[in-house]
Amino acid sequence: MKPVFLDRDGVISIFTPNDYLKTWSEFQFLPDAISGLQKLSGAGFNIVIVSNQAGVSKGIFSEHDLNDITEKMLAKLKKHSINILKVYYCIHKTEDNCNCRKPKTGMIEKFISEYGDFERSESFFVGDSDIDIELGSKAGMKTILVLSGKTKSAEETESWNYRPDFIVKNLKEAADIIINHSKGENHGKENQGSGLE
């Protein structure tokens, strides 16, 4: 199995500061997301989405709304020959102190309990925020920060406790790194800021 773990909002879909994607009508794929997912799917990776969605427990939208978005997102991706292995959501608030809310590793542990362990040091977590990079690092994976969501510049990462292994503009560029790494073409840890302003 070759899993690759992706955050949703800011990586696959648009990031909405101070708000949530509450309905399918609000959901929009980022410009390069589908082509990036096609690359990963075509290269044989098992795509796993790992996302915090505290809006459910806050009463902003329902779990039914969240499931509706997910079903329609997966159907749309399938039309582009993209199969998502699994989608994990944490619907809890920070104060619920669950073990699944990123940056805690509960959703990765759930994946392992369902699908078995994997070569973590050769696997990637792709996200748009510090908590994604922290989760990926804590789980022993390589991490890629995309600047298509919450984080807008490489400079923002300088104060983070966990730094990304790679920083790229979007999921399409992240997919290239993951695929090249799996072919043994890219073993360098430092590719930060490549092609960025």
Image (cartoon, rainbow, N blue to C red):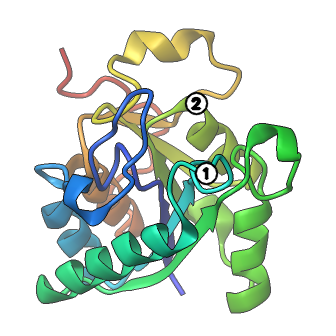
**Where 58 sits versus 129, above or below?**
below
**Where 168 sits versus 37, above or below?**
above
Amino acid type at circle 1 is Gly
Q: Which mark is residue 113?
A: none
Horizontal relation, residue 23 to residue 32: left or right? right
Residue 189 at x, y = what percent? 49, 38
Residue plotted at (37% across, 59% down): 178
Secondary element at image label 2: helix
Mark 2 lies on residue? 130
Mark 1 lies on residue? 59
**Where 26 sits versus 184, above or below?**
above
Residue plotted at (67% across, 38% down): 134
Which numbered disc flags the more N-terminal residue, 2 or 1?
Answer: 1
Residue 51 seen by the camera = yes
Q: CA distance from mark 2 to mark 1?
A: 25 Å
Q: Residues within 10 Å of mark 1 (few under 14, many from 20)?
A: few
Residue 48 seen by the camera = no
Q: Residues within 10 Å of mark 2 (few under 14, many from 20)?
A: many
Quadrant location, the C terminus: top left
Q: Quadrant of residue 146?
A: top left
Foreground pick, 71 / 121: 71
Residue 63 at x, y = what percent? 56, 69
Quadrant location, the N terminus: bottom right
Residue 51 at x, y = what percent? 54, 57
Amino acid type at circle 2 is Asp
Q: Quadrant of residue 90?
A: bottom right
Secondary element at image label 1: loop
Foreground pick, 84 / 3: 84
